[in-house]
Image (cartoon, helix red, strand yellow):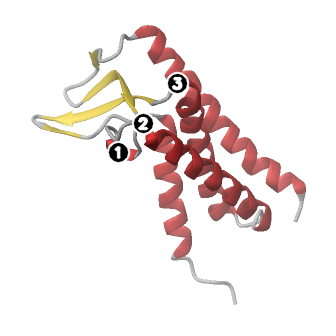
């Protein structure tokens, strides 16, 4: 397995982390907590904090969830890095893993340094809304979708 492949995948993760942290930094500098800026009828930029996981799961659990999700993120990063090393020539699989790794580490940084994750992308339509999210969450979602797509590919004979 060529080391260049491993570094290529880890570079994609590093780009995700950089974009995630930079956009969160911009939001924190431009918005006070809870502030909304309407961009379209269905999209706002906001400054929210999420102490839980995706979609606010366990957001109000009393604090233990910070360490729980930190442990999950660290474990996932170790497993994903191992999988990337082991399968570095499988492009779709490793691209999905690289996106998930970058997203997990971007949110992990927030969780460790701030105690919560900064969310700022908020989609809504009339009275319906989707929980606010960030670049890391987007990368994780796209990465998981790519992993699912990869799982449906025919195995090579």
Q: Nearer the viewer, mark 3 or mark 2?
A: 2
Rendered residue at 63%/84% (across/down): 155
The reply, left or right, for residue 7 in relation to residue 122 is right
- Looking at the rendered image, the quarter that the C terminus falls into is bottom right
Rendered residue at 43%/9% (across/down): 30
Q: 95 or 46, which lies in front?
A: 46
Q: Nearer the viewer, mark 1 or mark 2?
A: 2
Residue 147 in the image: above or below residue 5: below
Question: Percent position (x, y) of residue 126?
Answer: 10, 34
Q: Is residue 107 visible?
A: yes
Mark toward the start of the polypeptide (1 vs 3): 1
Give the class, few, some or many, for how many residues have Cα within 10 Å of label 3's Cα (few <14, many ≥20).
Answer: few
Q: Is residue 99 visible?
A: no
Secondary structure at badge 1 equals loop
The reply, left or right, for residue 22 in relation to residue 122 is right
The reply, left or right, for residue 53 in relation to residue 79 is left
Rendered residue at 35%/15% (across/down): 33
Mark toward the start of the polypeptide (3 vs 2): 2
Residue 69 in the image: above or below residue 20: below
Rendered residue at 24%/24% (across/down): 40
Q: 10 or 91, which lies in front?
A: 10
Q: Which label sits on residue 70? A: none
Quarter occupied by residue 48: top left
Q: CA distance from mark 1 to mark 2?
A: 9 Å
């Amino acid at each position: 397995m060529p080391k260049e492949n491993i570094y290529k995948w880890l570079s994609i993760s590093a780009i995700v982390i950089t974009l995630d942290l930079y956009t969160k930094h911009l939001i924190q500098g431009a918005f006070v907590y809870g502030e909304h800026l309407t961009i379209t009828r269905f999209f706002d930029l906001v400054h929210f904090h999420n102490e839980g996981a995706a979609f606010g799961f366990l957001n109000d659990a009393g604090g233990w969830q910070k360490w729980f999700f930190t442990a999950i993120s660290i474990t996932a990063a170790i497993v994903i890095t191992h999988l990337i090393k082991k399968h570095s020539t499988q492009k779709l699989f490793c691209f999905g893993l690289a996106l998930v790794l970058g997203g997990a580490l971007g949110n992990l940084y927030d969780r460790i340094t701030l105690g919560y994750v900064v969310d700022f992308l908020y989609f809504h339509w009339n009275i319906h809304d989707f929980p606010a999210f960030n670049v890391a969450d987007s990368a994780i979602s796209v990465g998981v979708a790519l992993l699912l797509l990869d799982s449906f590919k025919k195995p090579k004979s």
